[in-house]
């Protein structure tokens, strides 16, 4: 738990950008049971407004703690409680406004509400900037004795200990005040990107081979890039990325602004790099990041094997990037209603126990989830577990594909980790670090895949499921590491004073993607317009987030194998991990669960698992080939 004296708006948000499109209905056309119920946060906008005014009236009270924090355990405790309770209420305010905005990003009412909060709590951050420097004037032995003499301080031990660990990166009170005020502008590049990409960027029309005319928004691109018709895919890819290319300069400025924000914060706090600044607060060695990138690059042969299998199954002379999302098994289209998806997920997650499954059913039945895409709705999917005294909320854009079923299982993993941590841990320790955030979600995907493959006897459907699972290795391990590699390179370039324009970003991205996909080896052809894909990826605004998809994927595969083997102790350790919140540093949390992320073993096991799946696919393909002979 990182001790902070500013409002932490969101504990966990994990947004996917690989969501498929759908024939959208308006919200009024969708039954209430498929829409989340935000009245569990505030019943009306007026109630939100009243709560905001109440909190606003309390902010100046922080001044009463000035000069008292190192004098007694009671003084320190009262300050901790004040900040914790304020944080809890402020999170509710931001959840309500933020999720209201996500339902229709065109609605400026909720945008305005978020801006009000950003202004208010930026001011609070400036007023409370004295707290950390003041605590650090004492020796740790003094604070440690306070905690030992006042047991109610124990939930704050992790944060206070962490504060002293990061002492060299904590600034003076005037400097901390400036850093707090800078919060008003630090989120601007990401906000501009989100608004422009989801609400204001003109979307082009395309007419498909069947005569269907499609407005190619980001969501609809996600759907039609997976078309079975290769000419349609070519049209969709070219049109979408050529449209992004028209705004190359603007997208370049947005991302450059975000990178410069990261550099400003890293330099201001005396970190050696933006990477260290992002990883150090959670006590993650930068070597973990570098090892992931290096080890994945060493194992690109497994990725290239996957690409060659896809080429074989599609029967094409040259595999192109535009083929990567297309179905590879003819006449097999895996479609599931939301009700069918819910039943599949409930069955698949049974190895995690009756209590786990019962809570999942509750989430589905009691409107924790906003299911279907609607005009203006935030694309992708996420789980927001910030409401401590309540339940998590999930946003989906469900379109009936198997990928959507997998996304449902994925986000329910986040939901359960938030739910269990909130129930088990005191508020200061309930929020879990992002490094472990993707373990629970990808763990659920592993269980879903294994359930589906065990139930299936039809070779064609089995092939489709196996390839879908391999696509997960591609998307979560290799693609996300490629993104992490790109993110590191653009930050390192900017830290050296090199320019980051739309042109340079496109060149850097193209060089990298050609390397990963074996373009020079003839593995996969990358058309020139793919250089603009970086502008389609919102995670580049999340400050070194994406590498954690890859590390979590490797951790979850290792943990899931143990649980699925029937090892009761492994299951108990995993449930304890889900319930641990931020009570320990992430590396230690995972070690207790049964996996050591400072070693190469998790990645090696993941590559081994991937090769086993590819062995099974090739076995079925060879059998089918022999039958034809």
Image (cartoon, grey):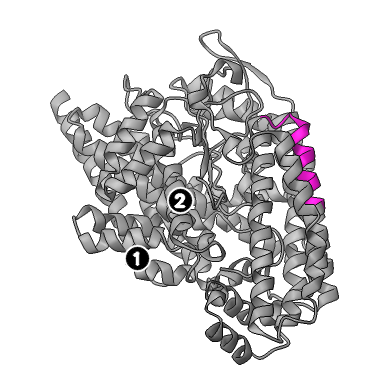
Vertical placement of residue 143 versus 106, above or below:
below
Residue 84 percent across, percent down from the top left: 64, 63
Q: Residue at x 30, y 45 (%)?
A: 447
The answer to whether residue 454 is left or right of residue 582 is: left
Residue 416 percent across, percent down from the top left: 42, 49
Label 2 sits on residue: 419
Dot 1: few (<14), some (14–19), or many (≥20) neighbours within 10 Å?
Answer: many
Q: Is residue 109 magenta?
A: yes
Q: CA distance from mark 2 to mark 1?
A: 18 Å
The answer to whether residue 410 is left or right of residue 97 is: left
Q: Residue at x 50, y 57 (%)?
A: 548
Dot 2: few (<14), some (14–19), or many (≥20) neighbours within 10 Å?
Answer: many
Task: Give the magenta part as a residue range.
Answer: 104-119
Q: Residue at x 76, y 72 (%)?
A: 267
Label 1 sits on residue: 593
Q: Under tag 2, what secondary structure?
A: helix
Q: Quadrant of residue 6?
A: bottom right
The residue closer to the viewer here, 35 or 489, is 35
The residue closer to the viewer here, 305 or 216, is 216
Vertical placement of residue 415 versus 130, above or below:
above
Q: Residue at x 32, y 22 (%)?
A: 330
The residue closer to the viewer here, 208 or 259, is 259
Are discs 2 and 1 less than 8 Å apart at CB? Answer: no
Residue 306 percent across, percent down from the top left: 36, 44
């Amino acid at each position: 738990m990182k001790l902070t004296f500013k409002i932490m708006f969101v504990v966990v948000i994990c947004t996917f950008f690989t969501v498929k499109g759908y024939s959208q209905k308006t919200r009024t056309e969708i039954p209430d049971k498929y829409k989340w119920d935000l009245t569990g946060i505030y019943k009306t906008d007026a109630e939100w407004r009243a709560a905001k005014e109440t909190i606003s009236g309390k902010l100046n009270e922080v001044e009463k703690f000035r000069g008292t924090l190192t004098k007694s355990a009671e003084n320190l405790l009262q300050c901790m409680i004040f900040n914790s309770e304020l944080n809890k209420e402020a999170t509710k305010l931001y959840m309500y406004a933020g999720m209201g905005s996500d339902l229709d990003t065109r609605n400026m009412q909720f945008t305005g509400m978020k801006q009000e909060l950003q202004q208010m709590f930026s001011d609070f951050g400036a007023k409370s900037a004295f707290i950390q420097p003041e605590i650090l004037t004492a020796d740790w032995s003094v604070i440690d004795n306070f905690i030992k003499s006042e047991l109610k301080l124990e939930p704050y031990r992790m944060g206070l200990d962490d504060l002293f660990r990061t002492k060299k990166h904590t600034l003076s009170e005037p400097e901390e005040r400036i850093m707090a005020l800078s919060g008003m502008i630090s989120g601007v590049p990401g906000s501009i990107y989100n608004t422009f990409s989801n609400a204001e960027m003109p979307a082009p029309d395309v007419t498909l081979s069947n005569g269907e005319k499609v407005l190619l928004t980001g969501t609809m691109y996600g759907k039609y890039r997976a078309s079975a018709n290769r000419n349609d895919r070519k049209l969709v890819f070219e049109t979408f990325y050529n449209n992004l290319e028209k705004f190359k300069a603007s997208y370049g400025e947005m991302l450059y602004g975000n990178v410069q924000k990261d550099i400003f914060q890293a330099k201001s706090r005396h970190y050696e790099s933006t990477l260290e600044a992002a990883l150090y607060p959670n006590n993650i060695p930068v070597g973990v990041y570098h090892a992931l990138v290096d080890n994945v690059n060493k194992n690109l042969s497994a990725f290239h094997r996957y690409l060659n299998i896809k080429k074989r199954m599609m029967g094409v002379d040259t595999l192109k990037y535009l083929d990567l999302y297309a179905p590879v098994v003819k006449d097999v289209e895996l479609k599931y209603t939301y009700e069918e998806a819910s039943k599949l997920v409930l069955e698949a997650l049974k190895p995690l126990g009756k209590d786990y499954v019962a809570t999942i059913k509750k989430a589905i039945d009691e409107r924790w989830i906003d299911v279907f895409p609607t005009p203006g709705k935030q694309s992708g999917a996420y789980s927001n577990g910030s409401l401590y005294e309540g339940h998590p909320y999930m946003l989906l854009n469900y379109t009936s594909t198997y990928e959507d079923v997998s996304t449902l299982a994925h986000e329910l993993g986040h939901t359960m980790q938030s739910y269990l941590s909130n129930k088990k841990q005191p508020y200061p320790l309930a929020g879990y670090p992002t490094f472990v955030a993707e373990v629970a979600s990808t763990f659920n995907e592993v269980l879903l895949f294994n359930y589906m493959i065990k139930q299936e006897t039809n070779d064609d459907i089995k092939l489709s499921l196996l390839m879908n699972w391999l696509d997960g290795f591609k998307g979560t391990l290799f693609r996300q590491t490629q993104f992490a590699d790109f993110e590191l390179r653009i930050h390192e370039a900017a830290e050296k004073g090199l320019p980051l324009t739309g042109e340079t970003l496109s060149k850097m991205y193209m060089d990298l993607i050609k390397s990963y996909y074996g373009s020079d080896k003839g593995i996969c052809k990358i058309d020139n317009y793919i250089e603009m894909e970086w502008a389609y990826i919102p995670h580049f605004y999340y400050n070194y987030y994406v590498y954690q998809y890859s590390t979590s994927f490797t951790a979850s595969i290792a943990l899931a194998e143990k649980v699925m083997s029937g090892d009761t102790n492994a299951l108990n350790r995993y449930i304890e991990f889900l319930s641990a919140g931020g009570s320990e540093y992430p590396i230690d949390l995972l070690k207790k669960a049964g996996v050591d992320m400072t070693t190469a073993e998790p990645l090696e096991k993941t590559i081994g698992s991937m090769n086993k799946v590819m062995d099974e696919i090739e076995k079925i393909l060879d059998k089918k080939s022999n039958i034809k002979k």
